[in-house]
Amino acid sequence: MFTIVRDLIRYNIEFAIGLLILLLLIGAVVLSFFSPYPAADIYVVPPDMPPDAEFWLGTTSRGQDTFWQLMIGLRNTLGFGVGVAFLSRILSLVVGLTAGYAGGRTDRVLMAINDSIMVIPQFPILVLFYFVLKDNMNWLMLVLILSALGWSYDARLIRSIAMSLRTRPFTMQSVYSGMSMRKILVEEHLPYVMPIVFATTMNNMIWSIGMEITLSVLGFTDVDTPTMGQMIYWANSHSALISGIWWWVAAPVGAIVILFVGLFLLSMSMNEYIDPRSRLNRMGN
Amino acid sequence: MQTEALLHTPKAASEPILAVENLKAYYTTKAFGIDRDIRAVDDISLTIAKGEIYGVAGESSSGKTSLIKTIVGAIRPPLHVVGGSVCFNFEGQAYNIYDLGPDELQTIRWRHLSYIMQGSMNVLNPVRRIKHSFFDFAFAHMGLDRATFWDKVREHLRRLDLDPGVLDSYPHQLSGGMRQRTTIALATVCTPEFIVADEPTTALDVIVQRDVLTMLRDIQRDLGSSFLFVTHDMSVHATVSDRIGIVYAGRLVEEADTPTLFRGARHPYTQHLVASLPKIGDATRRASLSGRPPSLADPPAGCRFHPRCPLAMDICSKQVPPLNPLAPRHRVACFAVSGATS
């Protein structure tokens, strides 16, 4: 594991940059716990101050320090992405491996559910959830809802691999030696699909964070938990761009761009590591 | 290879460890309006004595592997058993494979009955170290604690001239022959009484073949196990098998001790098979039988060999020749040999 990471850093510049960005973000998450102000408090500092030595990223019209808001927002946003990715990976692994291995009726039932979720238009459903839940819609609830919507594509991907694994001699040998289905899936097939799961994790995080930001910017989530999207929401509602408080918008937008670039680079280098043939594609003819 | 083999004497038949009676297993497909049976194993009876190496020979798609799978009970749809029985005798207790429940089946598999499957060098999980495969497949059947289990595994590998270091390797780090021998070690680590090996030497070069065959013989000698050994390679049979059964189109057509089969085969198919083998110093062209093996979905009536048989008579296309004993350990299914009465 360590040598793989070392070699990737040495020979894969995308991975090195992605990892650096990820480490910076993790640093921000750690830093957020030392914030001098509680996240939800307003008018703790003079409002509308431009960036200077005391307020590195200025202050907002609500009297909050933009820098500390950004740190706490990054923590929530990253936690959101990781939470959704983790839960939806479990769902997609269970469904994908079971459907691919069991086949037959189990496969048809699971894939019917899978395909139904796949064709549901996600954004309208999320808005609908907000209007139904209203005040009960919080950060955790959104994690659960997005996890329940975000596993179907990857479940299909894992199923396709499981279907091939099912016919391999080592699976037949496992069956013959009397391993239970659960054991075969966990011990024999899971290690096989794990690299693919890692690669899809990055994509899933990009998707879920993007979704959360979209909902927050439009105000369709709990706007009291600071996230990247929530910062933009409050900046918009105070017409920050028009009144010249550009740092209030620039800080979260810049952070989101950096976060996405980092995740994208990691996802790409991960794909390249798993499938070296993609290197040839990038080399051209 | 042949001359060496022709020297070994058949072992005395004791109480059989395996008795297969009138076994029939068909691949049944019912899909999109096509409804047919592929009769891959059709009415096969045989017995194998304790400590005996029984070879099954036949050409591709003659039903060798299907026969093996049916005997060890490793079948999955569309292959299913239509009739007959497979009865093992382990430690004085009879086990009828198709009467046992899944739990009882698990108690005899690996412990008593081991199966080296076709393409067996791929039975090791490519993404896990070999020790995990050993643990997953064999640990539950040995009933030992971990330390004793690993000691036993290492000792077994050493006995088979394998470095115990292979346990820490991934399968792709080993050569084909090493992988094959590791797989055989894996299949025999529980010292089973009956080992079924399906084409264990196919796709290996002759030197590795020799290693693998020597190893199988050593295991057989050490453990006193019985072997059911399948390959289409007659020279391998000559080296390893005590007794050979020839399968043609899902049926057993002739069965005899190895020397008898190579020197005095009676069934016309076996005669042609043996005559087709190259011999050192004999440069004559080998004649090939005309025609092709029949489709098992729609086999010819009567004897399945009759469309290609030089000795075919009227009765051959009407009645199925029974597998009659010709000599004490020699059975032939042919009207031209055993007479037209049945």
Image: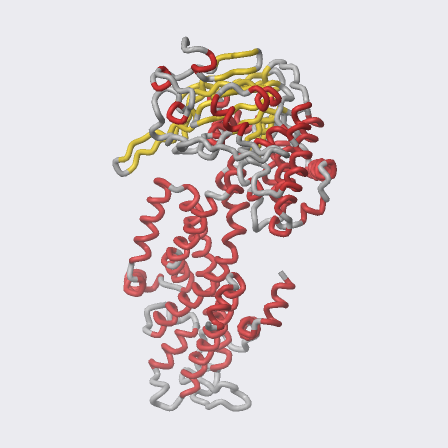
State whether residue A40 is above or below residue A129: below
Is residue B305 at least partly visible in the picture?
yes
Residue A103 pos. (x, y %): 39, 42
Q: Is residue B168 left or right of residue B199?
A: right
Q: Is residue A148 left or right of residue B59?
A: left
Report which quarter residue B162 is drawn in: top right
Q: Colour scheme of this structure image?
A: secondary structure
State whether residue A63 is above or below residue A226: below
Q: Residue at x 43, y 47 (%)?
A: A163
Residue B28 pos. (x, y %): 35, 31
Q: Residue at x 61, y 39 (%)?
A: B183
Residue A12 pos. (x, y %): 57, 71
Front in this rendered view, residue A269 or A67: A269
Q: Residue at x 71, y 27 (%)?
A: B222
Front in this rendered view, residue B38 or A153: B38
Q: Residue at x 41, y 11 (%)?
A: B340
Q: Which residue lies furthest to the top in this view?
A: B341
